[in-house]
Image (cartoon, coloured by chain):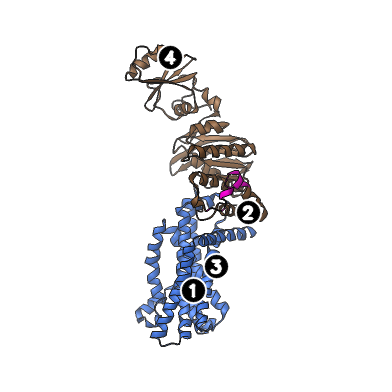
Amino acid sequence: MGKYWYETIAVAQRILTELLRRRRSLIFWIIFPISVLLLNGLILQERANLTTADAFANAAPPSLVGAALFFSCLGGSVATVVSEREHQTLKRLFISPLNGVSYFLGIFVAHTCIGIGQTLIVYAIAAWVGAPLNGSILLGILIILLSIVAYVGVGFILGTQFARRTEDVNALVATFGVPLLMLGGAFLPTQLFPELLLRIAEYNPIYHMIEALTGVSANGEELAAIAPHFWFLTGFAALMVFAGWLSYRHMVRLERRL
Amino acid sequence: MLRIENLNKSYRDRPVLQDLNLSIATGEIYGLLGPNGAGKTTTINLICNLLKPDSGRIEIGNQPVSEATKKLIGVAPQENLLYRSLTCRENLDFFARIYGLSRLERQKQVQACLAAVNLVERANSPAETLSGGMRRRLSMAIALVHQPKLVILDEPTTGLDIEARYEIWDLIRQLQEQGVTVLLTTHLLDEAERLCQRIGILKGGQLLVEGALEELRQRIPAKEIVVVNTPEEQRAIERGQQFGFTPRRYGSDLIFWIPEQLSLKEIFDCFVDIPLDSLSRQPVSLEHVYIEVTQSQNNIGFPLPAVIPDPWTEESSY
């Protein structure tokens, strides 16, 4: 167990150090959630006739799990895996005694740290304009963690199966990501969706992430009230971790040689 | 330190290694040579437990190859494979952690490896800012950071300038002084000549010859080699044969094995009425042995002398 922990922290620390080293990327990861939150908050305030506090309380969940975490955790984990493949550092890891589980967990931990940082930024700004944090903080954190797990799992699937070069990442994220984000309510409240789109959205995990977190943090709801969203998210996260792991194993089988 | 017995490996139906037997003693530098596709990299993959053999056995330090033996091996692959935005120190520290070194061991080993590869002054420079030679040295330092018993260097100086090559060669010699076993693959035959105690030549997945450099040289029954450049090659071949020289074709070069030491005048006298563009003498080197072993079109229709085993027509006894 100690070996896994030791290796996981080493991988996570390496990813975070690389991010710190590329200061521009770090700054962009900070600017992105702030800009999305401000835009969502201001649009809601104006068009839904809400107070600034209520508008930002409702804007924070989609800005965070629907946009910020999507790009940092899904896009980030795809980019991490693809970069390792492209620069072949993954081969160096194959030679080493690093366990695949530790590698997966290391990427998860690193992106969790980035996600936590973005969560703090989003909710700090929301709090600064007076947005209340109504529900259980623990439940909110659990929803955010499940979202990160799901995104990293999807990132592993895309990074190991569909993207071989860094250029592929943008195309992948744009093709799969942007429609899912819109359909999930990241940029537009789902209340405005027509009936048909709303039905389709119910199969979109991002919709459930946003609804679950909005229910807890903006509306102060308990687990029972958000249960359908929460359990959908839990199931999806578990499925993505499993599928991500299988995808990783498949890639290892194909690439495990010098 | 390394023992390979009856190793076989195929990719689909194509045999890549056939009954490979090889052993390397502790502290030895062993050169594994061979053309591209000979099976060198597959051998390394099998030693590193990245591939499973179809049959046969590999032991490192008397342990069968497994995930556990990975800690005994340090590999510097052909490409440097570095985290480019991390500094030299961070690259080393990361791999030291992956190999399970404690914080104190890491500090000590990272510093020692930086010093060994002469990168102390660039310890805090990102890998992407290093020159090609420095990157290669860093790659070697990563292979050494966990103090492996067996170091595998896959073409360690390919693409480097001569100064950087000398630095890498010095480092390899230092490893040997410290009792580390080195398996070196290279296409640079002078590199193998300079560094290796024993050399094996692999072709088509088979180890065709193996031995110390002098033993390999003795497989060519010549005191020296003469390279002749003439527009009348056929006459030169016939003349050479009259004097007991063995003609060979190495690429576009026509060469003769000279069975006894002759002066330059004596050699010129042999080709007296043949127009020569150039004539040069060379000692028998690993390059000549390598070409004899790996190429089958050298003998210009003349059978190989009995002294050198002909790997294309009979089973090698080495």
Residue A60 numbered mark, or none: none
- Closer to us: mark 3 or mark 2? 3
**Viewer-proximal residue among B241 and B129:** B129
State whether residue A107 is above or below residue B209.
Answer: below
- Quarter assignment of residue B168: top right
**Viewer-proximal residue among A72 and B53:** A72
Which residue bears the numbered disc 2?
A: B100
Disc 4 sits on a residue from what chain?
A: B
Could you tell me the amino acid type at mark 1?
Leu
Which residue bears the numbered disc 4?
A: B267
Secondary structure beneath disc 2?
A: loop
Instruction: Residue A143: say if magenta.
Output: no
Disc 1 sits on a residue from what chain?
A: A
Q: Looking at the rendering, in which quadrant would you find the N terminus of chain B?
A: top right
- The blue chain is A
Mark 1 and mark 3 lie on one chain; the one further toward the N terminus is 3
Task: Give the x, y percent position of residue B299.
Answer: 40, 22
State whether residue B98 is above or below residue B196.
Answer: below
State whether residue A200 is above or below residue B264.
Answer: below
Q: CA distance from mark 4 to mark 3?
A: 77 Å
Which residue bears the numbered disc 3?
A: A113
> Within 10 Å of the Cα at label 4, are there few (<14), some (14-19), or many (20+) other Cα atoms?
some
Please say if the residues under marks 4 and 1 sit with CB atoms less than 8 Å apart. no
Could you tell me the amino acid type at mark 3?
Cys
Can the viewer see residue A95 in this picture? yes
Secondary structure beneath disc 1?
A: helix
**Which segment is the magenta one?**
B112-125
